[in-house]
Amino acid sequence: MIRRTLLACAAALLATPAAADQLIENVDGVRIDEDGRIDRFAALLIDDGGRVKALYDRDDERPRDIDYLLDGEGRVMLPGMIDAHLHVMGLGLAQLTLDLSDTNSLDEALAKIRRFAEDNPGRPWILGRGWNQEKWGLGRFPTAAELDTAVSDRPVWLQRVDGHAAWGNTRALEAAQITAATQDPEGGRVERLPGSRTPSGVFVDAAEALVQRVVPAPRPAERDLAFQRAQEVLHSMGVTAAADMGTTIEDWQTFRRAGDNGRLSLRIMSYASSADTMELIAGARPTPWLYDDKLKLNGVKLYLDGALGSRGAWLKRPYADDPGNTGLPLMSSAQLRNILVRASNGEFQVAIHAIGTAANADALSAVHEIADSFPGDRRWRIEHAQIVDPADIPLFGEHGIIASMQPVHQTSDRTMAEARLGPDRLGGAYAWRSIAATGAPLAFGSDAPVESPDPFSGLAAAFTRTDAAGQPFGGWRAEESVSREDALAAFTRDAAFAGFAEGRFGQLVVGERADFVLVDRDPLLATPEQLRATRVLQTWIGGRQVYKAD
């Protein structure tokens, strides 16, 4: 056969699946081998099914009957990055609505909201997310009256950066018929103006639903566009697979439409938004892998508490900066255990959102109470595991409970965590190394759109415990950092394991899907500053290029 470079037919590869053996030569390859060790290689052979067929060192003889040959030009090749916890549709819809995550003050946010409304006069509601009163230095929640100064002619509804609170203007509150007589729902809190029952405009956790119920839902076409935008963003950052936390039936149908129409490129390990949704999607058991290992419903995502930023995280002791408040448990201990049993009877995997000390303690206790009744490979997951009582950390190891954590949360939340807890209660905060030392697996992600889905920023935070400015010097509670190698594993092999995807993708071993990225620097050698500036040059999934940098 005629040898030709793959670059010459890149456009065709974007439109059609791989149909012949391909050799990608002259790469500085880094992978996690079959024994879990870092292995370096110089060439990768992909079979006609898009799987890894062989890897070669510099001096190894190459096969001679290759259909397509690509010169990697000495670039660094890594396994495709896997985000162990994000919200795919949340990320996509954020591309179509107002993003306040870059605002540094209330005034700056109000100005941006005002401009967005002026630029979009036909939108009946102004929707968005990303505000953070802590980042603004406000010292309190914003109010509906302040939002009215930006937009007063139509409803405005804006989710906080963590998704655990939302801010509405007067028109939004009127549309939802919110008044001083409105009661706090179980698991939620309506913020009030000081000294009164008048709603201030901010709704925490379950109280968000009081207004959300009247917000127009995205139409299918808007969902499809949002999903394509999410895939584009993730692939541009080297992400080839992700665990979608809180998949609704509308989300699942969006993924299925993309799969049916040949537009599903991201590999999605899905966790339903409720036990009812789990069974509606999958029936009695988890779904099989669909679309050539692109989509699977693994189980259910449960919310046990809220977030630190909105003081909804459930703590054993009151907040240091809000005496008397221990946060908001979003379900009772009995409800948690009932759902765990219900899911386990169907062999569904359970992922429990737990941020505060009390939430983590209840999640760990619940798993330990029922684990012996459901033997086998269950892979219980606790999502975030941000603030754990040091006395409870050993429980992670007893049943191999996966700690699905987000390194960038530590850098974003550091000063807030100190304020919320005080200096004497930080022993189990973002305790990656302590949890791993119990033998529990770590899986790393971003929680996008709460944080950027850039995995290279997460890698840098994981081994430095510092932010993009290098602060604090030496790292915050640096004893809880992990090695570069372990961080890379947590964003690849271990994230796949956490979603029952090992052997399918995640390591670049023979027989797995050929999911990889070409980048401009080696993450195991770059400085933290260089690592955060990593440029993704190409992203490939199943031996097919899905992204190429300009």
Image (tube, grey):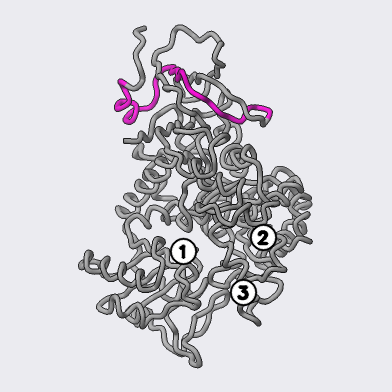
Mark 1 residue type: Val
Label 1 Cα crowd, 10 Å radius (few <14 / some 14-19 / many 20+): many
Q: Are marks 3 and 1 in contact (CB under 8 Å)?
A: no
Residue located 74% across and 50% down the image: 374
Residue farthest along the front direction in this orientation: 473
Residue located 40% across and 33% down the image: 537
Secondary structure at badge 3 equals: loop
Residue 336's quadrant in the figure? bottom right
The CA span between labels 3 and 2 is 17 Å
**Residue occupied by mark 2:** 429
Query: The N terminus lies in which quarter of the figure?
Result: top left
Residue 237 against residue 115 in the figure, above or below? above
Label located before the other in sequence (3 or 1): 1
Residue 128's quadrant in the figure? bottom left
Give the camera-side residue of 475 and 260. 475
- Residue 517: where, in percent of width, then height? 46, 33
The CA span between labels 3 and 1 is 18 Å
Residue 331 on the magenta segment: no
Secondary structure at badge 2 equals: loop
- Residue 73: where, in percent of width, then height? 42, 22
Mark 2 residue type: Ala
**Residue occupied by mark 1:** 161
Query: The C terminus lies in which quarter of the figure?
Result: top left
- Residue 51: where, in percent of width, then height? 50, 25
Q: Is residue 380 visible?
A: no
Label 3 Cα crowd, 10 Å radius (few <14 / some 14-19 / many 20+): many
Residue 514 against residue 257 in the figure, above or below? above
Q: Which contiguous range is marked in magenta?
A: 8-35
Secondary structure at badge 1 equals: loop
**Residue occupied by mark 3:** 327
